[in-house]
RNA sequence: GCCCGAGUGGCGGAAUUGGUAGACGCGCUGGACUCAAAAUCCAGUGUCCUUUAAAGACGUACCGGUUCGAUCCCGGUCCCGGGCACCA
């Protein structure tokens, strides 16, 4: 019997599905382990070979953990709300739900062929009302909460209202949009509408006017992480800044916890670093400058991380969008300032980024007083200062800040160096080193001492105070689209009012057309009766990240109709032990999820404050494109090795008609009508194609469909090969060059059990050598899987199988554990062989073999190397180092000894049965 | 510009993190079995000198350092990949 992967794979996939082999149970005495993949957005193109990389890795780990006696939760679902389905709907009129269903069916089919051990009974999609009910529910909770800075967590808004009624804002330290102050009397005198507006300043989910990324082409606002280089991530359309009232999530309130929480997570350093940069904590000082405008005095607070340079301030700069800008503009400068503001306003985000080196600005006419020197400095307005960060105003120290320097040069403002010996004739001196000068009491200090000294001074004199700032902004939470979760909010007398919880889910209404209305309102405005008790409902919908922010919780208890997750399920599964997905979510999903989870944690709905304990980023699989070379002006194609002899043009060729860079000539002629009569210049009778590594995409004809690999080599080969390609976290091109190797390995493995037509496994006792082979593999596989070095595990497997093949070992005692160990990687063939060995149950219920070191260790080899009679160091040699190795090593040390002079090397070598006591003097 | 990560044969990549560099796989060369091919098996395969072998020298991007010993640690340079980008 040959290794018939087609029959085998189909058979066992059916078996696993029928028997619900991978169902996870809550009432288990085993320890739990939760392995999660970032669930996919089901696009119309289907899966390519890069998508399953992470899924295979997580599947191997899940299967391994099951063998190790864990109760494993390994679920899968779909992130199904999204822009592509909606855009397709706008173009074709087809309901997004229909396309989404179709795409999901295809994804499922493709995934099933690879043999994943998902518990499909827990599957859900985010666009299902039964699911998004909980997205809406969480939103209502955020709407009904504020963030208390003094207790460091979210609290119900009712508590804040009670405080307002009693004491107004006195003594409160809460996260807010803008600092408000009012008394209890004032609060109690406010109208409902006024109260609602005030509360919006504190709610965690709130509505507020803010400068947003507006994409006119998509007709919607976008979050910061959805914009790349001033273009929308989806579609690549220009994005502009626009002031709009939008729903937002007060993520900034959690900045500190999001940052500090990283410490205890088992994530890669690079990913943590990305989040740290995104959150962007900086320690600085807020200093008040008195500014004189036409004789009128205003206090302007600036933020700086370098108060030590305050003696070098030669001007101040305001953000154009700052609220202070109008007030600080003198009458005679008004026209020019307004002209500048108009100019800034009409720039798109992309232009702003592109022109980041062009310095622009205008003088406001006002002068500020440096609180330390009493000096008068001009106040300028420039777009290089951002309204959204710090206070929207800065003190400029051109000598020691490159941006201030560029500005000063352009507008001829003075540049005063305050660090000894630095040269600022060509560029600013930004480094935090050197001795201070021209700086009053700071003179002579090192910059590193001057920073805290200046902070202390400013605080002592009451001129300002230390301040921690974060770059992290609140998340814009509304989208002007159809295909998303509706907000459970209606407008009663214009007041945003939450829908009662028992009215959830608020389901998406049917509408006639999916595009925005003529008046620019979101598509939901087209819905008939989009009202609640006669009041209009919110017409924007939630963004893509809403549905994916807490989905890992839902898998714990996916069919619960009354809670997001029951306390029991949550306390059992707690959080994700291993999360595998791409780095592209570093500053989006992975921040939002952590925020969302912390919020639910604050309110006591979940028991862990971090959602993902360990995170692995699988690399991207790039495409490997193939080229043919057409001789210019002809229909003649020259093989890659000979192309230098002609003037040629490279053309992408469909990789499906190329194998190992050899072109299938007939298939090529049939590929496109224009190549029907193609002629070829061959080398060694073959046409060799050129190649390049590029992004995997349809237009480059380099997309590899996993189905094709499954057809040709089988799912087990695909799984093994994707893991054998290299380290999981590295990006690498898909290259089928080596795939024959792993396929050969599987066939070899099979032949340990079958010699052509017969099952040949014997009950003969294993020899010491057999056991050594086996246990070396057990030890290696265990260590490697735990560290996700799957490629070296597979190598170890190949070594073991070669070894057993060479020695013609077909003993049950050896092969049975081998099958178990292979099952995470190649589950189908393992299942087949497991049953051939006479087992009734799935190999998934077997136990991972115990590693016995005694079978592999033959010796401990230790050198003690002494010079002048003193032991200088000892060397432990690798356990499997053979005699030749040891001798080579000894030679090396002898050389060393000679080099060093008259010393001796004394080796204590204990190698029972092999090398005993080689002593060199 | 700033912050991470990396650079090892013809190729993908190993190397117990300071101790046999190049495991394993691909590719290539030669051989066995075949009428032949496929499949399978065996041998060789970093570079240089050498008819071959033995033996040797050189080799982990480049330059320098620490060490008895460096792919690994330190300093500098050059490339590649990723992230952030007027965040004061």
Image (cartoon, coloured by chain):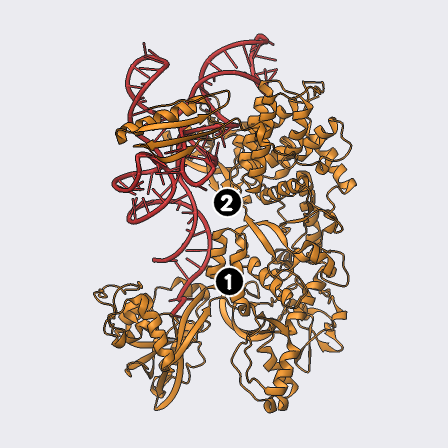
Chain colours: A orange, B red
Q: How many marks?
A: 2
Q: Hey, which quadrant is residue A815 in on the image?
A: top right
Query: Is residue A393 shown above or below B54?
Result: below
A497, A576: nearer the viewer: A576
Task: Give me the disc on residue A585.
Answer: none
Residue furthest front as drawn: A869
Q: What percent of the width, then of the height, locates residue A407? A: 31, 70
Q: Is residue A191 left or right of residue A568?
A: left
Residue count near mark 2 (Cα–Cα under 10 Å), binned few <14, some 14–19, many ≥20: some
Which part of the image, by quadrant, shows the C terminus of chain A?
A: top left
Asked if residue B19 is positioned above or below residue A699 in the image, the reply reads above
Q: Nearer the viewer, residue A135 or A728?
A: A728
The front one of A881 and A442 is A881
Q: Is residue A892 left or right of residue A77?
A: left
Secondary element at image label 2: loop
Q: Earlier in the sequence, mark 1 or mark 2?
A: 1
Please say whether residue A401 is visible from this viewpoint: no
Q: Residue at (77%, 63%) from the top-left corner?
A: A562
Q: Provide residue A549's location: percent of width, then percent of height.
A: 62, 60
Question: Residue A695 got which mark?
Answer: 2
Which quadrant, please, contains the N terminus of chain A?
top right
**Badge 1: residue crowd in 10 Å (few <14, some 14–19, many ≥20):** some
Q: Chain of mark 2?
A: A
Q: Identify whether A763 is placed above or below A824.
A: above
Q: Between A209 and A266, which is closer to the camera in this rendering?
A: A266
- Left or right, residue A372 beside residue A886: left
Marks 1 & 2, CB-CB < 8 Å contact: no
> Which residue, given by chain and number where applicable, does mark 1 sit on?
A259
Determine the secondary structure under disc 1.
helix
């Amino acid at each position: 019997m040959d290794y018939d992967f087609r029959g085998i794979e189909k058979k066992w996939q059916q078996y696993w599905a029928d028997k619900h082999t991978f169902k996870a149970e809550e009432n288990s005495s085993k320890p739990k382990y939760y392995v999660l993949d970032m669930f996919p957005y089901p696009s119309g193109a289907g899966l390519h070979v890069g998508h399953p990389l992470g899924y295979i890795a997580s599947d191997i780990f899940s299967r391994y953990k099951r063998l190790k006696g864990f109760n494993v939760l390994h679920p899968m679902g779909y992130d199904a709300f999204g822009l592509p389905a909606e855009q397709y709907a706008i173009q074709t009129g087809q309901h997004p739900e229909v396309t989404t269903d179709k795409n999901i069916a295809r994804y499922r089919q493709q995934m099933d062929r690879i043999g994943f051990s998902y518990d499909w009974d827990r599957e859900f999609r985010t666009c299902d009302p039964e699911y998004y009910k909980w997205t809406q529910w969480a939103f209502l909770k955020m709407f009904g909460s504020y963030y208390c800075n003094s207790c460091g967590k979210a609290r119900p808004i009712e508590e804040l209202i009670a405080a307002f009624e009693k004491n107004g804002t006195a003594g409160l330290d809460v996260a807010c949009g803008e600092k408000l102050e009012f008394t209890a009397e004032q609060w109690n005198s406010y109208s409902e509408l006024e109260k609602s507006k005030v509360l919006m300043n504190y709610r965690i989910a709130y509505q507020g006017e803010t400068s947003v990324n507006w994409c006119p082409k998509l007709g919607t606002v976008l979050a910061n992480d959805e914009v790349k280089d001033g273009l929308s991530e989806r579609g690549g359309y220009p994005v502009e800044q626009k002031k709009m009232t939008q729903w937002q999530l007060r993520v900034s309130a959690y900045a500190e916890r999001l940052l500090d929480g990283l410490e205890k997570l088992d994530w890669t350093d690079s990913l943590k670093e990305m989040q740290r940069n995104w959150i962007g904590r900086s320690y600085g000082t807020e200093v008040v400058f008195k500014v004189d405008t036409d004789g009128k005095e205003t206090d302007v607070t600036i933020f700086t991380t370098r108060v030590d340079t305050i003696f070098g301030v030669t001007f101040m700069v305001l953000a154009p969008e700052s609220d202070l800008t109008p007030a600080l503009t003198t009458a005679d400068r008004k026209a020019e300032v307004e002209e500048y503001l108009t100019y800034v306003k009409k720039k798109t985000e992309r232009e702003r980024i592109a022109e980041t080196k062009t310095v622009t600005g205008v003088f406001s006419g006002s002068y500020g007083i440096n609180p330390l020197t009493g000096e008068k400095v001009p106040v300028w307005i420039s777009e290089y200062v951002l309204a959204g960060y710090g206070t929207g105003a800065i003190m400029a120290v051109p000598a020691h800040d490159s941006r201030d320097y560029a500005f000063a040069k352009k507008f001829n403002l003075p540049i005063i160096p305050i660090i000894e010996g630095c040269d600022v004739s060509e560029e600013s001196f930004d480094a935090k080193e050197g001795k201070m000068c021209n700086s009053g009491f700071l003179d002579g200090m090192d910059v590193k001492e001057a920073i805290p000294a200046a902070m202390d001074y400013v605080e002592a004199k009451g001129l300002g105070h230390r301040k921690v700032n974060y770059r992290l902004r609140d998340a814009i939470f509304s989208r002007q689209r159809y295909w998303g979760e509706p907000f459970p909010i209606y407008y009663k007398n214009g007041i945003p009012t939450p829908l009662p919880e028992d009215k959830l889910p608020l389901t998406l209404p049917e509408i006639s057309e999916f595009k925005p209305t003529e008046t620019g309102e979101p598509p939901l405005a087209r819905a008939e009766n989009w009202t609640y008790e006669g009041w209009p409902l919110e017409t924007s919908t939630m963004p893509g990240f809403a549905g994916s922010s807490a989905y890992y919780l839902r898998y714990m208890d996916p069919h619960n109709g009354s809670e997001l997750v029951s306390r029991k399920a949550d306390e059992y599964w707690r959080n994700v032990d291993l999360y595998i997905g791409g780095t592209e979510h570093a500053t989006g999903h992975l921040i939002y999820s952590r925020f969302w989870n912390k919020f639910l944690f604050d309110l006591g709905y979940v028991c862990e404050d971090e959602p993902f304990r360990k995170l692995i980023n699988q690399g991207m699989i790039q495409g490997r494109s193939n080229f043919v070379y057409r001789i210019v002006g002809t229909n003649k194609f020259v093989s890659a090795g000979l192309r230098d002899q002609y003037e040629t043009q490279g053309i992408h060729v469909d990789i499906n008609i190329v194998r190992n860079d050899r072109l299938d000539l007939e298939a090529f002629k049939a590929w496109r009508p224009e190549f029907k009569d193609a002629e070829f210049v061959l080398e060694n009778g073959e046409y060799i194609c050129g190649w390049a590594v590029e992004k995997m995409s349809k237009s480059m004809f380099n997309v590899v469909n996993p189905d094709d690999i499954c057809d040709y080599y089988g799912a087990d080969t695909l799984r093994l090969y994707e893991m054998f390609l290299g380290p999981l976290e590295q990006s690498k091109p898909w290259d089928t060059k080596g795939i024959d190797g792993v396929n050969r390995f599987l066939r070899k493995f099979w032949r340990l059990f079958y010699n052509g037509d017969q099952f040949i496994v014997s009950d003969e006792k294993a020899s010491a050598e057999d056991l050594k082979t086996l246990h070396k593999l057990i030890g290696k596989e265990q260590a490697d899987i735990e560290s996700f070095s799957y490629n070296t595990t597979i190598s170890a497997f190949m070594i073991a199988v070669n070894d057993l093949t060479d020695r013609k070992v077909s003993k049950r005692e050896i092969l049975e554990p081998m099958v178990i160990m292979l099952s995470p990687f190649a589950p189908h063939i393992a299942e087949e062989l497991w049953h051939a060995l006479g087992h009734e149950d799935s190999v998934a219920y077997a136990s991972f073999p115990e590693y016995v070191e005694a079978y592999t260790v033959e010796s401990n080899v230790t050198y003690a190397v002494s010079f002048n009679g003193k032991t200088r160091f000892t060397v432990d040699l690798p356990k499997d180092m053979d005699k030749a190795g040891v001798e080579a090593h000894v030679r090396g040390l002898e050389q060393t000894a000679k080099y060093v002079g008259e010393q001796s090397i004394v080796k204590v070598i204990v190698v029972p049965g092999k090398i005993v006591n080689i002593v060199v003097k």
